[in-house]
Amino acid sequence: MSNMFRGKPHFQFCQSIDAPAVRNNLKATEWRLMEYLYFVAQRQNKMHIELTNSQLCAELALDYKSLRSAREGLEQYELIRLQRITDSIYVYILCSFGVPLEADWDRSGRTYGKRTVPFNQRTPEEYTKYYESRLGCSLRRDDGSPKTQANVRCTLPNHPDEKPSFSLCPTTGQFKCHGCGIEGAMVAFEMKYSKCDKATAGRNITAILEGRSPAAPEPEVLETYPYYDSSGYEAFQIRRYPDNDFKAWHLKGGVYTKGKGSRWKGIIYNMPAVIASTTCAVTEGEKDSNTVNALCLNTLDGMAVPATTNPFGALKWSDDHSPWFAHKRVIIMADADDKGRIHAERVGASIRRFTKDIVTITAWDGAGDVTDWMANHTREQLISKVDRDTGTSWLQHDSLQQTLEA
């Protein structure tokens, strides 16, 4: 193996697996998977290996559950990094303390992110400085040198640690919380502390060691709204945060990243259902769409009536969204304010190029939107309101449903 890695990567790998938290805790299946990955790496002359789940299960004589457990174990100890191609195909990136190993002969031309400082080269002084910042206590002896072992209170989120249950080795950066049950290295701690991915954790650690303020932890996600493309694959998702803050995230390499990604254009909420429908409702936001979808509205001939919207709500409608409504009947359920009415007018004008069957509801009897209105009304009352306010009879009443069932 030393010939394969030409010295430095081999040293990094040996240093990584010789860490106490790794050497003492790796399971037999995890060792088996790791040895096989390095065998394939030597055979293929690559540090990134694309393998299918079925291939690994067959080679290692494991079932899928055991394979997944072994994979998660190696990820926890930062011996591999994964990039998901499909649900059954992964790229395994060989790592040491989370840093991808590289060899002189690796001419793949692929990169997996940039790090200015390898985490496996941190000094005891740097480990100590980082943990003192996050734990809020001293980890030094009387002479100022880092302790070799410390038991302190855990500061990880959602863990009110009344007595010290956090064991730490400041000279190696390894930790274990006997209350949370979480253990690992410095990067794993920062990911849990800041609720972030590895790249952000790395930037936060570097900022602390350089005396700068790390990025603020990601706020709590209140709601998640997935957006699917016409094939039924998730294109991106909108997440709602406190103070009605909305952000887009998309999958990249098996990890969610901020931004809509490359497949966002023209995507509307609940799009596959809209494509399959003959009649649909358009609301100003995902919350209202979910409210209407929960009612399971139907047309007179029994077809489902899905509700949809565009990303980021009012005044964000694009003409790219409108072709999906060609030759359909559309009920626009506007919010009962000036901004909502303007938005509904723009949506109607854009969709009208593809269909003439459009009706709009702009008043909700004192309520702000369809969700507020439904808090005090029934499904049948909403259908009657649509009939009355728009002069149409596109939706199936409960009485008609009962007649059809009879």
Image (tube, helix red, strand yellow):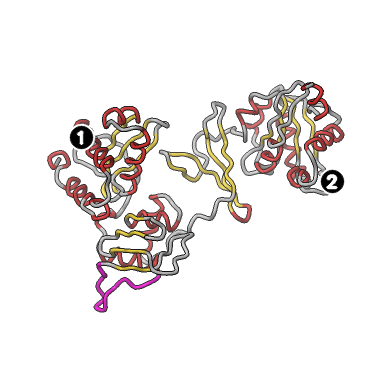
Residue 171 percent location from the top left of the image: 25, 64
Residue 336 percent location from the top left of the image: 78, 46
Image position of 162 with respect to 307: above or below: below
Q: Which quadrant of the figure contains the C terminus? A: top right
Q: Residue at x 73, y 44 (%)?
A: 371
Residue 377 percent location from the top left of the image: 80, 43
* Quadrant of the rendered image containing residue 153: bottom left
Looking at the picture, tell me which residue is in the foreground, 140 or 61. 61
Q: Give the left or right position of residue 162, taking residue 343 as reference.
A: left
Q: Residue at x 31, y 44 (%)?
A: 74
Q: Which quadrant of the figure contains the N terminus? A: top left
Kind of residue at disc 1 = Phe
Q: Which mark's residue is nearer the viewer, 2 or 1?
A: 1
Whether the magenta-drawn stretch holds residue 141 is answered as yes
Whether the magenta-drawn stretch holds residue 187 is answered as no
Residue topped by disc 1: 39
Q: Residue at x 44, y 57 (%)?
A: 194
Residue 21 percent location from the top left of the image: 27, 54
Decide whether the magenta segment is chiefly helix, strand or loop.
loop
Residue topped by disc 2: 365
Q: Residue at x 34, y 29 (%)?
A: 52
Categorize mark 2 by other alpha carbons within 10 Å: few (<14), some (14-19), many (20+): few
Mark 2 vs mark 1: which is more N-terminal?
1
Q: Secondary structure at mark 1?
A: helix
Q: Which residues are magenta?
A: 136-148
Q: Give the left or right position of residue 202, taking residue 157 as reference.
A: left
Looking at the picture, tell me which residue is in the foreground, 50 or 301. 301
